[in-house]
Image (tube, helix red, strand yellow):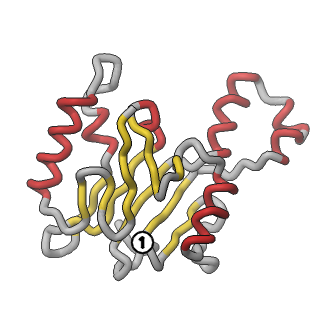
């Protein structure tokens, strides 16, 4: 399995902060040519890279979803971000750079503003929740789906000089 490097302040894989839309499209086309599979939904690779641009048309935000973990090993400093449980991942990255303890979305979204890295999941689930009655009463298929929230759904990088909470 190929590695997709998550490098805060630099980029994710071939897509780098500061690139133009045309440069990003070229990177995505290369990824799609190599990694788009017949069983993927149309434009799976293209749609997996969420890229935002500043007023000058340069990349200032890149986000990828956990669905890419079936195609790539998504690594930040040799940590597999989509196969490391959320609590452990936050703890390990917090040792490298502290997360924003004032984030209004605490628990579902962690940002590490000094390095320009963020992690998001739609709902919070902990190991302790797995032992609670409400979880045990769920149908097995729903339990399986709910357990995805032990991990983060997306990872993103951003220029450290942008305000994330007001970004569209």
In this rendered view, identify the residue nearer to me: 65 or 134: 65
Residue at screen point 66% across, 63% down: 91
Residue 133, image x, y percentages: 90, 37
Query: Which residue: 22% across, 65% down?
Result: 59
Left or right: residue 94 compared with residue 140? left
**Residue 71 x, y percent position in the rendering:** 39, 32
Q: Quadrant of the N terminus?
A: top left
Quadrant position of residue 157: bottom left
Question: Quick check: 10 left or right of 107?
Answer: left
Residue identifier under label 1: 116
The residue sitting at 58% across, 65% down in the picture is 93
Q: Is residue 8 left or right of residue 135?
A: left
The image shows residue 77, relative to residue 141, as above or below, that is below
> Up-down: is 149 above or below 142?
below
Quadrant location of the C terminus?
Answer: bottom left
Q: Tell me: residue 123, above or below residue 140.
A: below
Q: Quadrant of residue 106?
A: bottom right
- Residue count near mark 1 (Cα–Cα under 10 Å), binned few <14, some 14–19, many ≥20: many
**SS type, badge 1:** loop
Q: Tag count in the figure? A: 1
Residue in the picture at 47% in, 79% down: 114
Q: Residue furthest left?
A: 22
Find the residue positioned furthest to the top: 38
Residue 26, image x, y percentages? 12, 46
Where is residue 162? Give x, y as percent: 35, 78
Kindly indicate the quadrant of the structure image that contains residue 117. bottom left
């Amino acid at each position: 399995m190929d590695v997709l490097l998550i490098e805060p302040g630099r980029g994710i894989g071939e897509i780098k902060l500061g690139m133009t839309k045309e440069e990003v499209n070229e990177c995505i086309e290369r990824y799609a040519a190599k990694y788009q599979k017949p069983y993927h939904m149309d434009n799976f690779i293209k749609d997996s890279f969420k890229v935002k641009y500043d007023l000058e048309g340069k990349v200032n935000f890149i986000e990828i979803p956990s669905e890419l973990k079936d195609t790539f090993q998504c690594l930040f400093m040799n940590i597999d971000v989509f196969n490391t449980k959320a609590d452990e991942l936050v703890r390990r990255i917090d040792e490298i750079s502290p997360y924003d303890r004032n984030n209004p979305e605490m628990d579902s979204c962690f940002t590490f503003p000094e390095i320009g890295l963020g992690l998001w999941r739609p709902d919070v689930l902990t190991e302790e929740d797995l032992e609670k009655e409400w979880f045990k009463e769920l149908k097995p298929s729903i339990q399986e789906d709910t357990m995805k929230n032990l991990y983060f759904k997306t990872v993103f990088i951003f220029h450290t000089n942008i305000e994330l909470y007001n970004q569209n």
